[in-house]
Amino acid sequence: DVFSVGKPTPILKGNNCCIYNSITTVSKGKNYNPYNLISKFTQNGEANLSKAEMDKYLPEEWYGIDSVSRHHLSKQLSFSSISSWEFNIFEISELSNGAPLLFIGLAVLGSPYAQKAMCDSCGESESCAMFDPTWDNAGYDFLSKYSISMAKLCHFLRLVENEYNEVPYHNSVHAADVVQTLHSLLQMGGIEFARSPLEVFSLLIAACVHDI
């Protein structure tokens, strides 16, 4: 079996085989472990961006979304919005053209840099500040703490999302819902029980991958 990584749109996806529009094709054997592949997808043009460019980095899927939906998605993925218990994950799936885990993971794990990049991309820094006064500094700051580039995070989330099967329940929408729900519980006080930021980071990564 083979699958390809690097582009988000599947040509064919079944229980045993995934083929995507991409240059890179990887053998999917019996002992296949997707996490061993992460480093293979960081040495590209995205990974070589300057720090200034990286601070504004957004995945290519963002630019495939129409401008109206991008503005709406930017507001829905503010840190205060994704911390809400009443969050609507199906709306995110629709706005993101079927990439809910990529964008929820980016908004949670990439906060506050992801929120700033989305607002800047939409030219709405001032309105974002009005919508959420903490928009440019609220978040986990994992990227800085653990020296993770936005490009690497996006590659990881894209790879994980592509591993979810198109089934009625245990799909990428469910995974995104679990990530957001866990994040909401952490923000409602659960984070006080964590022993370190690394433990929180590990919990959220586990939520991303829990059903693949």
Image (cartoon, grey):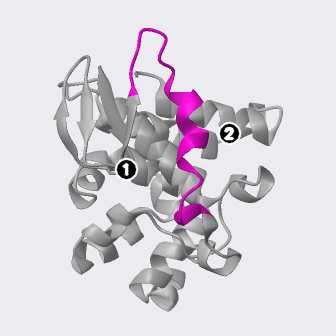
Residue 85 in view, yes or no: no
Within 10 angstroms of label 2, few (less than 14), some, or many (20 or more) residues? some
Nearest to the eye among marks 2 and 1: give it: 2
Q: Separation of disc 2 and disc 1 at Cα?
A: 21 Å
Q: Position of residue 22 (x, y in %)?
A: 31, 48
> Mark 2 — residue?
201
Within 10 angstroms of label 1, few (less than 14), some, or many (20 or more) residues? some
Which residue lies at the image location 26% right of the left edge and 50% below the top edge? 93
Q: Residue 81 colored magenta?
A: no
Which residue lies at the image location 74% right of the left edge and 32% below the top edge? 199
User: Looking at the image, which is closer to me, 26 or 155?
Assistant: 26
Left or right: 44 in relation to 136: left
Residue 82 in view, yes or no: yes
Q: Quadrant of residue 162?
A: top left
The quarter of the picture where the C terminus appears is top left
Left or right: 78 in relation to 97: right
The magenta region covers: 27-47
Tell me the kind of residue under disc 1: Phe
Q: Position of residue 206 (x, y in %)?
A: 56, 28
Q: Is residue 146 above or below residue 31?
A: below
Q: Is residue 11 above or below residue 32?
A: below
Q: Secondary structure at mark 2?
A: helix
- Mark 2 and mark 1 in contact? Answer it, CB < 8 Å: no
User: Looking at the image, which is closer to me, 195 or 31?
Assistant: 31
Residue 87's disc is: 1
Which residue lies at the image location 59% right of the left edge and 57% below the top edge? 110
Q: Secondary structure at mark 1?
A: loop
Which residue lies at the image location 56% right of the left edge and 42% below the top edge? 40
Q: Is residue 81 above or below residue 41?
A: below
